[in-house]
Amino acid sequence: MQDMDFMDCCFGKARVLLIGGTMEERDFDIIVVGCGCAGAIAAYVAAKRGKSVLVVERGEYAGAKNMTGGRIYAHSLRRVIDEYAGGEIAWEDIPFERRITHERIAIMDPESNLTLDFTSRELGMEGQDSYSVLRGDFDQWLMGICEDAGCDIIPGIAVEELLKDEAGNVIGIRAGEDDITAYVTIIAEGCNSLLTERGLGARRPKPNEMAVGIKEVFQLPAETIESRFLCKEGEGAAMLFVGDCTHGNVGGGFLYTNKESISLGLVATIENLSKSDTTIYQALEDFKNHPAVAPIIRGAKVVEHSGHMVPEGGYNMIPKLVHPGALVAGDAAMLCMNLGYVVRGMDLAVASGQIAAEAACDAIDRQDVSAAGLSSYESKLRDSFVIKDLETFKDWPHTMESWDRLFTEYPKMVSEIFNSMFVVDGTPSQPLRKRLMPIVKKRGLFKLLKEVKGALMSL
């Protein structure tokens, strides 16, 4: 191994391990590439299992490369804390923004909007709770618990390639002129992972499988947020939009309430954006000025603007997860699910990070870090909610992509239906069925029924 300027922070050589009949020495037991939800949790769990861990993060700090804002379903994080923290982490010390108690879904055409607002006691119950987060703050907290657990963390370093031995087994990473070795490398660097493509043979995602997310954060007083969203102190709303927000492109809008800010943004597939006459930046400006959105952010100050790539292909995008000496977790494993009414990624990332760390530690303890020795990662991931949920909805991404009228004709139809119900202008009224049927038939009744049936079968 070459001498490294930044290796002064390390523990020194990890213990000697018998692999393939020869005595091999490594710098660390485990290297984790990326300090997001999957990477940080993997590092934390491995350190708690007594392993020497190095975390390499290409951002200047944890969270620097993530879009600020989002939502985490807390069940998988709660499991990690219950099993490994030993009372060292208080739930109230985690930098959550607001507990989500309101679910809103909005269908928009250029001039109108239909919003469904659902709230219930179950939404905020322990074990079923979810929270808005600002990833800059949340990821730095994750980095902090990793450091407290004994991990070495090096930010601002880009991993250029994976190190392999003559047999093709991954034995570490190369960053610049420095080679760092480990028994297991866990790749959790996000969905735009060149390491999995160049080093592990993962296919490059198709344009229709990846989306561009763009977001702005609007600063508002806590009392204003609670008033506009009818929420109690400390509680908040998550809101998803479909229709005109993306100018008819496959994708949607999102909004999350934070303590003293609102995260607002759009996601649209790369394929659709490449064919669109409107850039996503212009779509965001139009979205902010829509009659359904403008009052929400009235008087707010934009304090942050960010963009990010998002995997949208679901189950069919998942690459090979287990390799000799390496595992792939989180967004790098394409573990993300967008159902239109629920968007999940962080809870899947946390769970995959925990399972990856446990599989790596078990393999090291058994002195077998071959693909077979690490295979419990994939088997346990498939037995967990992570792969099961993705597999359940594996047909939805294709359905949504082919159902282009969901983003164009359907919002217009909804607007016409509700206008016919609520507009009173003094002319004689017709029975509701006579008002609604022409609106529906104009879109093709049988085609509509076929599309709705296909969507329901996918969901």
Image: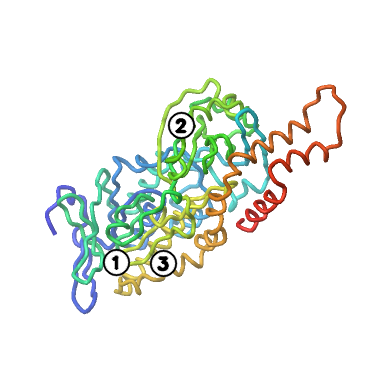
Q: Residue at x 51, y 38 (%)?
A: 97
Q: Quadrant of residue 139?
A: top left
Label 3 residue SS: helix
List the single residue furthest toward the bottom. Answer: 21
Is 50 positioned to the left or the right of 436 in the image? left
Label 1 residue SS: loop
Q: Quadrant of residue 140?
A: top left
Category of crowding for the residue at label 3, using alpha-carbon neighbours closer than 10 angstroms: few (below 14), some (14–19), many (at least 20): many
Is 123 positioned to the left or the right of 381 in the image? right
Among the two numbered marks 3 and 2 on one chain, the one whose residue lies closer to the N terminus? 2
Q: Which residue is mark 2?
A: 216
Tell me how far mark 2 sits from mark 1, CA to CA.
39 Å
> Could one spot residue 223 in this view of the protein?
no
Q: Which residue is mark 1?
A: 325
Q: Is residue 404 above or below residue 368?
A: above
Label 2 residue SS: strand
Which percent across, then down, holds residue 264? 51, 34
Which percent across, then down, holds residue 90? 48, 47
Q: Is residue 91 above or below residue 185?
A: above
| Circle 2 or circle 1, nearest the eye | 2
Tell me how far mark 1 sits from mark 3, CA to CA.
12 Å
Q: Which residue is mark 3?
A: 377
